[in-house]
Image (spheres, coloured by chain):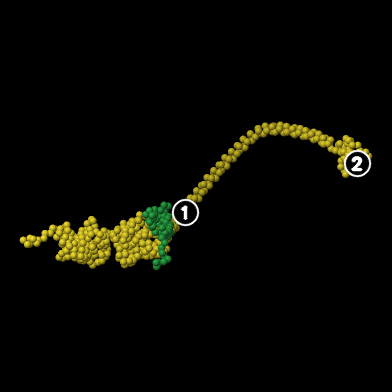
Chain colours: A yellow, B green
Amino acid sequence: MDLFEQRKIYSVYEITSEIKKAVEKFGIVWIQGEISNFKRHSSGHIYFALKDERAQLKAAFFRNSNLYLKFKPEDGLEVLVRGRISVYEPRGDYQIIVEYMEPVGLGSLQLAFEQLKEKLRKEGLFDEARKRPLPLLPQKIGIVTSPTGAAIRDMLRILARRNASLHVLIYPARVQGEGAAREIVEGIRYLNSRQDLDVIIVGRGGGSIEDLWAFNEEIVARAVCDSRIPVISAVGHEVDFTISDFVADLRAPTPSAAAEMVSGAREDLMATVQSLQGRLVRAVRGGIETRRLALERLARNRAFYVAPGKIREFQQRFDEAALRAAQTIHRRLARARQREQVAHTRLVKLNLGQALLHRKEIVAGLSLRLTTAVQACLERARARTQMASGRINALSPLAILERGYAICRDGKGQIVRDSVRVAVGENVEVKLARGELFCRVNQIKEN
Amino acid sequence: MELKVKDFESALKSLEEIVTRLEGGDLTLDKSLELFEEGVGISRFCNSKLAEAERKVEILMKSAEGNLKEAPFAAEEENPEA
């Protein structure tokens, strides 16, 4: 009865809650074991069991905790986890809620690196056959890197030193820390969207494995693989290898080396082109020279001595024949011309006889009329001349004096036309038709 | 003459082929002169590509509208220790 009185009855939930409280007293624990039955839910939560030879423990690794996990947990992997033991009440399962996980042996980054490398290798992304050669003579290159890092400075210094005639386009991207991988991917994709680039260099200077980590991210590796434009991966120092180095068309040990790779060829190419030009000219000259020599050899052949003689003979005979023909033609022409001329002369003479006679008559008539007309003209002219000279005589002062007039001049030789111009007693000269009178004025009568 | 080649690699390759064929010497005179002419054209193209010098450094800047624009990039070459 007492037993009955004493008994305490739990509901399933109550006892589970009690167990949960008891279990959670362990607080934070570290457990090492092998992963088995690994499942990633679409929500991002991870469920698995940790086991060793004799036991296993269920584990839940929620999304917000596993988000920054670098490596990929998988069955069989020995890991060390940190978490709290708890009870999932709906199932009555006790489990560890994992907050942190790291691989045992390798560092987690190292493991992640190996895992991705293995995965991509299996996909064939490292195959040499996939890799494209760099263009011999890049004209314009794109660089995805930090604009403030050592890498870009080193590359530009090398390009300047080598006097590389390159157009460089920089896509500024963060190369370490949160979001770096995303920016590098965007850079590679953007540069691929352009049509003017011959090569892309992706890289950064040296640093720790954490610093270089972006270049080990799968999205970067895939962007490098997908690049239409050949990619040079130039990350860190010579000893640093990243996944992007393996997938790139070319790995440069350092950014400086990448700059040398894209700028080295110009001088060599100039020499190559020049030597090809020389060979081109020599080959053609050689071809012509060979033919000339062959021709000379042939020309020395006896057959060509005989033939020219014959040709000359033919030539001569032809010339002679041609000459004879020409002479015959000339002679015939001359004779024909002569005959024609005789006939022509006769014809002309015949016609001229008639015409001359007729014209002579006309000319004789005309000349008679001309003479008569000229004589009449002369006669008229003579008569008019005589008349004119008679009138001129009549106008001459001498002719006037002849008619009885006189000219009176005063002592100064001025002609006196008015009686008031002279005074009584003044001497005047009077010119007559013949001779002069020197007179003194005795009286003046005004008109 | 219209050049068939557009890029330096293929130009150099066909120039090499032409020279090799010419040096082979079993071509007709007409053919060899034709090849010679083509070769001269290609080597001129190669030289012009080698001479095309555009030394320029630009950086992409995001404009207010979010478009990428090229801008001159001043390298700190004078101060490598910075």
- Residue A195 in view: no
- Apparent side of residue A391 relative to residue A8 in the rendered image (left or right): right
Instruction: Name the one closer to the observer, A415 or A151.
Output: A151
Quadrant assignment for the C terminus of chain A: top right
Expressed as whole percent of the image width and height from the top left, the position of residue A413 reads 87, 43
Q: Position of residue A49 (x, y in %)?
A: 18, 61
Q: Amino acid at mark 1?
A: Pro
Q: Position of residue A301 (x, y in %)?
A: 43, 57
User: Of tags 1 and 2, which is closer to the observer?
Assistant: 2
* Residue at x 41%, y 63% (from the top left corner): B75
Residue of label 2: A423
Task: Determine the image quadrant of residue A128.
Answer: bottom left
Report how far apart the C-alphas of labels 1 and 2 lie in the structure: 134 Å
Q: Is residue A366 above or below residue B66?
A: above
Left or right, A14 with reference to A306: left
Q: What residue is shown with label 1?
A: A308
Tag 1–tag 2 contact (CB < 8 Å): no
Q: Nearer the viewer, residue A268 or A105?
A: A105
How many other residues sit within 10 Å of disc 1, few (<14), some (14-19) or many (≥20)?
Answer: few
Labels 1 and 2 in the same subunit: yes
Considering the image in quadrants, where does the N terminus of chain A appear?
Answer: bottom left
Q: Is residue A72 above or below residue A366?
A: below
Can residue A236 be spotted in the picture? Answer: yes
Task: Give the answer, above or below, for where A358 lies relative to A36.
Answer: above
- What chain is tagged by disc 1? A
User: Where on the picture, by quarter, is residue A10?
Assistant: bottom left
Which badge, 1 or 2, comes first in the chain's sequence?
Answer: 1
What secondary structure is found at the residue carrying circle 2? loop
Question: Label 2 amino acid?
Answer: Ala
Q: Residues within 10 Å of mark 2 (few under 14, many from 20)?
A: some
Q: Secondary structure at mark 1?
A: helix
